[in-house]
Amino acid sequence: MMAGKTGYKTFKGGIHPPYKKELASAKAIVEAPVPHEVLIPLSQHIGAPNDPLVSQGDRVGLGQKIGASEAFVSAPVHSSVAGTVKEITEVTGFTGAPAKCIVITSDANQPDFERKPGKELDSFSDEELRAIAREAGLVGMGGAAFPTHVKLTPPKDKPVDMVIINAVECEPYLTCDHRTMLERPSDLVQGLKLLLKATGAKKGIIGIEANKMDAVDIMRSAIAGEPDLSVEVMEVKYPEGAEKMLISALTGRKVPPGKLPSEVGCLVQNVGTAVALFEAAAWGKPLYERVLTVTGPGIKEPSNLLARIGTPVSALVEACGGIVGEPARLIVGGPMTGWAQPDDSAPIVKGTSGILALTADVVDVGSEEECVRCGKCVDVCPMFLLPNFIVQAAKNGQWDRAEMWGALDCFECGCCSFTCPAYIPHVDYVREAKAGIAAAKRG
């Protein structure tokens, strides 16, 4: 564990970008309008893609499972509306890659989700909770979208003794986790207790950055009388919420390169995922909607929305009053790790935490120049990599050298790109290197 200048727990490296959370942090979560049409990608997770369970013309109900896979590392998808399957087709997803989607035309009158009465939460076994997480299609909702039931099944020789709720939300502009803590603290605590039950862990920690002290106070009240749970205040620094950084700051444990948190007895879950596990266990609700932040100087009314999975970006921007000014960049996700969009047609998925419209006055869009060897990218890298060397290897198509310099250990936080005076898009090169390494290994 390491304490920063503020005395709060933190890690070595990182940056302090303008956080701009005040645009939406005071906006309570509201339900977004149900769109006329949803486009639900069959693959919204790390792992095997799903096969469709419906066909063109089929009627589907709200929450009905419409795509699944027999593979262990996978997560089914569910209809986010009641309606009719218009087609199963390929569209361009938010990453720019083609995504096979089930397109559903929504009924004019949408039913409310019917909560199914279940067992007392403390009566579920670990096996039942893993099965519930899988059936509900739960994944990490902070962006990585790793199937939750897989995380809840650590290797038998690597037992988990600590569950960490990642409530840091260090990405600038985003406030959906903050609002969830303020508005649903009890549900988050119940989700954390279910995670402890599923893993057999004895201790749960909720890590929150010091720029959310109202959430710290509320969550500390919510865990009163729970001796195995605690709330820890973290230094405000990016990427404080990255899994390995968070574990290091809170526990002092170091996850080895290429290894998972279970290697050091930890499991990390996002706020939204913990609440979704509570909903799945208590109500039988699958993951067909999520809270996300639509914000930025280019959005007329920045908001935190509860939106149906598969809703086009355009519909959510419209729900927030539309675009104002001249947007220089539309991003799905946050400004550091999100994906710039060529238009607003892509659908949101389970891991979409935000939609961001930036105007030209806040976006420095300088052209890429030659590296000036300043070493700033090395100084801020929280993984202690050499981003400049990875970039050079990627430019030359030297995938073996890119791997040697740690491209696969990079989690694409963007600290290097943020600090670079030569405007080098390091993360783009890292992504290119990862694809090249994978292709080379496939032969």
Image (spheres, helix red, strand yellow):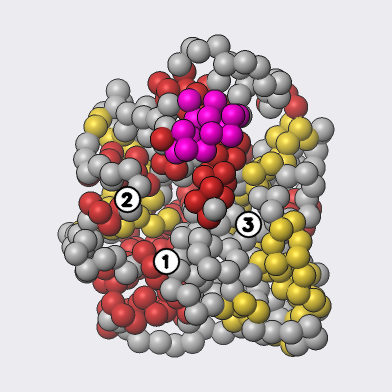
Q: Which residue is mark 1?
A: 148
Dot label at residue 259: 2
Marks 1 and 3 sit apart, C-alpha to C-alpha, by: 23 Å
Badge 2 element:
loop
Badge 3 element:
strand
Which is nearer the N-term, disc 1 or disc 2? 1
Q: Report which quarter residue 396 is drawn in.
A: top right
The answer, for residue 231, to whether it is visible in the render is yes
Dot label at residue 305: 3
Q: From the viewer's side, name the closer residue of 200 and 93.
A: 93
Please check the rendered image and state whether residue 391 is part of the magenta-colored stretch, yes or no. yes
Q: What's under tag 1, amino acid-wise?
A: Thr
Which is nearer the N-term, disc 1 or disc 3? 1
* Number of residues whose C-alpha sits closer than 10 Å to that of mark 2, classed few (under 14), some (14–19) or many (20 or more): few
Badge 1 element:
helix
Viewer-nearest of labels 3 and 2?
Answer: 2
Above or below, comparing residue 155 to residue 68 in the picture: above
- Name the residue located 22 percent from the left edge and 44 percent from the top edge: 253
* Number of residues whose C-alpha sits closer than 10 Å to that of mark 1, classed few (under 14), some (14–19) or many (20 or more): many
- Name the residue located 55 percent from the left edge and 39 percent from the top edge: 433
Residue 77 placed where, x, y %?
59, 73
For this view, does 161 lie left or right of residue 62? left
For this view, does 258 lie left or right of residue 272? left
Q: Main secondary structure of the magenta part?
A: helix
Q: What's under tag 2, amino acid-wise?
A: Lys
Which is nearer the N-term, disc 3 or disc 2? 2
The part of the chain drawn in magenta is 389-403
For this view, does 37 lie left or right of residue 379? right
Above or below, comparing residue 309 to residue 393 in the picture: below
Marks 1 and 2 sit apart, C-alpha to C-alpha, by: 17 Å
Q: What's under tag 3, amino acid-wise?
A: Leu
Viewer-nearest of labels 1 and 2?
Answer: 2
